[in-house]
Image (tube, grey):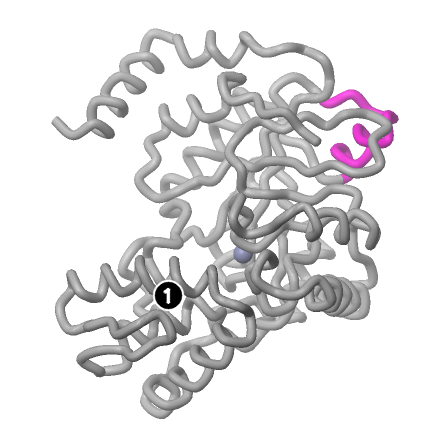
Amino acid sequence: MPKHRWKNALLTAAEAVGAIDLLQKTGREDGQSLYVLAYHRVEAPALNPWLDPADISATPAQFAAQLELLACRYHPVALADVLAAQRGEYSLPRDAVLLTVDDGYSNFMDEIFPVCARFGIRPLLFLATGCVGSGTYWWDQVYQLIHHSGQPALDTPAGRFPIGSPEEKARARRELLFALKRMPGDQRVDWIGAAYDRFVRPSANPPRLTLSWDELRALRQAGVDIAPHTHSHPILSQIPLESVRAELRTSRNLIEHELGECPPVFALPDGKAISYHQGVIDLLFSSGCAIVFSMLDGRARVRPNSAHLLLPRLGVWQGLSLPHFHYRLTPRIDRPTR
Ligand SMILES: [Zn+2]
């Protein structure tokens, strides 16, 4: 039996006897602990040929089950609660959870927001403003290059990738994304843009895949918090600090202009340790970000009276069983917070 099957079988048994509930209760009760969940897309796999199914966080059924668990056994909080806790004006409830969603795909409107509303959960949407209403993020263009260009191979700055067979496509996706994330911003943008215009755009007719400003205004009216996640979603460790500043300024100004307000929080694109460095964090803090969210796995601590916080988030992926989801929301993964 593969290792993950053993793990799932163990976690299912642990859930059945109440062991994960017990584990959940072992944490400190100090009004500072917070689980921050990070979602991307919620949709049925293989429904959308234009977007990478690997970026689906949950199917609609999984998402509904996860939110039901949050509503029954946790205390979902809103961004305003977290900011009040940071100011020292509010003590977070035990088992506090903040639900965040990255990027701004249109299925937020159809699949994510209605379920949040049903369970009384107020999500925080991190928006990459450059793709509002128009459609394709750079990694979607890479996916479409691999799957819809009709080419036998792609010549890239990271080498030549054959993309004929499903195995070659999978390998190209994995290795090319790995290489592109480590490439200087201009080089990455230039290659993807030129290749996409040449091989995909002439024949492709993808539907609108991202939220429009009208939809975002409706979501804001309905209580969704909407905060910046850069303008063009570069990997911030690979671009000059001046460009990081411009990415933050542009996305913040657009959100303020279109939605009337912009909360002082920010989510790092990709969010893993290789995707930012201390200079990026210092710049974000000095530019007015009270909280910066990474994708380092772990439970966050919202220290009161701290001007700036860099908080980890818990990623969610398709194939995560409900007992494993519950197990991730236990204090076993406390991570020190700066
Ligand atoms: Zn993102």
Residue 91 falls within the magenta-colored stretch: yes
Q: Position of residue 75 (x, y in %)?
A: 62, 25
- Residue in the picture at 71% in, 62% down: 241
Q: Bin the neighbour count of mark 1 within 10 Å (Cα to Cα): few under 14, some 14-19, many 20 and up.
A: many
Considering depth in this image, is 327 or 275 the residue closer to the camera?
A: 275
Residue 98 image position (x, y, % from top left): 62, 35
Picture residue at 59% right of the left edge, 56% below the top: 237
- Answer whether residue 173 is magenta in the image: no
Residue 109 sits in quarter: bottom right
What span is in magenta? 80-92
Q: Is residue 47 above or below residue 189?
A: above
Residue 9 location (% of width, % of height): 23, 21
Indicate left or right for 171 with 307 as reference: left
Q: Which residue is mark 1?
A: 51
User: Does residue 236 sit above or below 161 in this rendering?
Assistant: above
Q: In the rendered structure, which amino acid carries the disc numbered 1? A: Leu
SS category of the residue bearing label 1: loop
Task: Classify 1 as above or below 319.
Answer: above
User: In the rendered image, which quarter contains the C terminus?
Assistant: top right
The residue positioned 34% from the left and 76% from the top of the image is 156
Quadrant in the picture for residue 18: top left
Q: Is residue 223 visible?
A: no
